[in-house]
Amino acid sequence: MIMKKKTSRTLQAERTKSHILDEALKLMKYKNFDDISIQEICENSGISTGAFYHHFGSKSGIVVAAYTRTDEFFQDEVIKKIDSSNIKNAIIGYLCEQGLYAKNMGVDIIRNIYKAQMDNASAFFLSAERGLPKGLHQLVEKGLDNGELCSDKTADQITEELLIISRGILYNWAISFGEYDIAKKTFSIIDAYLQSI
């Protein structure tokens, strides 16, 4: 398949959208998402309100874009570097990366994203077609195919359960204001789950 080269206009639009998202995430470090106005995001980004709506459609588009960026990172970076010679370790490592990614974003941003996703874009976050869930599903499928995971559950069921667990860990970490090492907690809980299948 031949990939079209991006035009300078397309590249500029991508840079602008990324800049707006970066500015919104900066605001989310110290303000609740509900308290941030589109006008404030526009002022911080140096863009018009029309440009904001062109790139995001609505304020909830910021939250979706933040998770889209996460998905791209997991699809483009994390899944490629995970050593899948031991599937249980690969799954644990993959989900620990999710925790570390959240830690790098900062607990305040994660708290804001959790609040916003429940109100604004829950269908998007639950989609199995997102990059992070797809990478996890690939690992689970490989483990079932090669016998490293022995379960009467399907790859879809195991992936869903792992995502529920990892969301719970992230949520608990966020409401605890990051009081514990999220990677260690993820390792411990996911390892215990995988030992059961």
Image (cartoon, grey):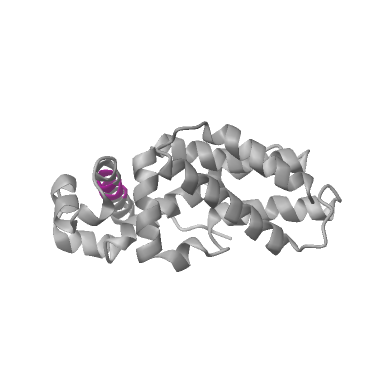
Q: From where the camera sits, is residue 156 visible?
A: yes
Q: Does the stretch in magenta take in 20?
A: yes
Instruction: Label the magenta part by its dominant secondary structure.
Output: helix
Where residue 92 appears, as percent x and y from the top left, is: 66, 40
Q: Name the residue at 78% across, 39% down.
A: 86
Where residue 15 appears, as percent x and y from the top left, is: 30, 48
Give the number of marks.
0
* The N terminus lies in quadrant: bottom right
Q: Nearer the viewer, residue 157 or 165?
A: 165
Magenta segment range? 18-24
Q: Using the image, determine if residue 108 lies above or below residue 144.
A: above
Q: From where the camera sits, is residue 81 visible?
A: no
Where residue 37 appears, as percent x and y from the top left, is: 18, 56
Q: Nearer the viewer, residue 54 or 158?
A: 158
Q: Using the image, determine if residue 61 lies above or below residue 182.
A: below
Q: Does the stretch in magenta take in 175?
A: no
Q: Using the image, determine if residue 50 lies above or below residue 190.
A: below
